Image: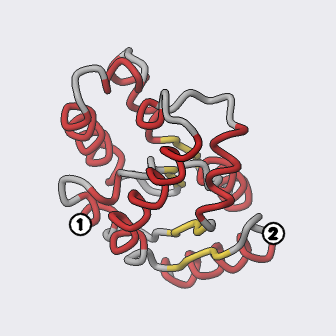
Amino acid sequence: MGVGKTTLGRRMAKQLSYQFIDLDLFIQQKTNCSISELFQNGEEHFRKIETEALRDLASMTNVVISLGGGTPAFNDNMAIISRSFSIYVYLPESAIFQRLIASRNPRPLIKGLNHDQLKEFISNKLKERETFYRQANITIDEHRPQLSSITTAIESLTEARD
């Protein structure tokens, strides 16, 4: 959450001349509900819908899909994700915290948290999910991904396709 997956995904899709899909937006269009509304029925409910949407998109080609931060960690989604080329966009906890504080995008999982609670939330989620994230084909390990990182990722993607 807040690392720039959507921004990076859009840039990659443009460079590759691929379609870009944000999984959360796809889910919202499919269900005609906001992510917040879906979370009102519990995270498990949302994660089930998320996995179904991921399965729907898994067979597509020439597409860059930006996943939610929790997607890899639920319902054996890594088995679906690993059929494709994946990128983990790493950002230090302190940078994620600053981005989420500055974000105007309400996120259901952190709604109502004070600064200390948000820091703890970020730390806990990264610890829980890191094992899944590290299964990606490559990691972009930069505070602000530069064009060179994106180019490297695209070259890796191209090599994997050949």
Residue at 54% of width from left, 47% of height from top? Answer: 116
Q: Residue 66: percent from the left, percent from the top?
A: 51, 50
Residue 104 visible in the picture: yes
Question: Is 30 in front, or is 104?
Answer: 104
| Number of numbered discs visible in the structure rendering | 2
Q: Which residue is mark 2?
A: 147
- Say above or below: 22 vs 90: above
Residue projecting furthest to the right: 147
Amino acid found under the numbered disc labelled 2: Leu
N-term mark: 1 or 2: 1
Residue projecting furthest to the front: 116
Describe residue 9's horizontal placement relative to residue 48 as left or right.
right
CB under 8 Å between discs 1 and 2: no
Q: Residue 92: percent from the left, percent from the top?
A: 62, 67
Q: Residue 118: percent from the left, percent from the top?
A: 52, 45
Q: Which residue is mark 1?
A: 79
Residue at 42% of width from left, 77% of height from top? Answer: 134
Question: Is 111 in front, or is 151?
Answer: 111
Asked which secondary structure carries label 2, the reply is helix
Question: Is 91 in front, or is 119?
Answer: 119
Residue at 56% of width from left, 84% of height from top? Answer: 159
Q: Residue 94: percent from the left, percent from the top?
A: 65, 61
Describe residue 103's horizontal placement relative to residue 160 as left or right.
right
Residue 9 visible in the picture: no
Label 1 neighbourhood size at 10 Å, few (<14), some (14-19), many (20+)? few
Residue at 37% of width from left, 77% of height from top? Answer: 135
Asked which secondary structure carries label 1, the reply is helix
Question: Is 121 in front, or is 77?
Answer: 121
Describe residue 88's horizontal placement relative to residue 17 as left or right.
left
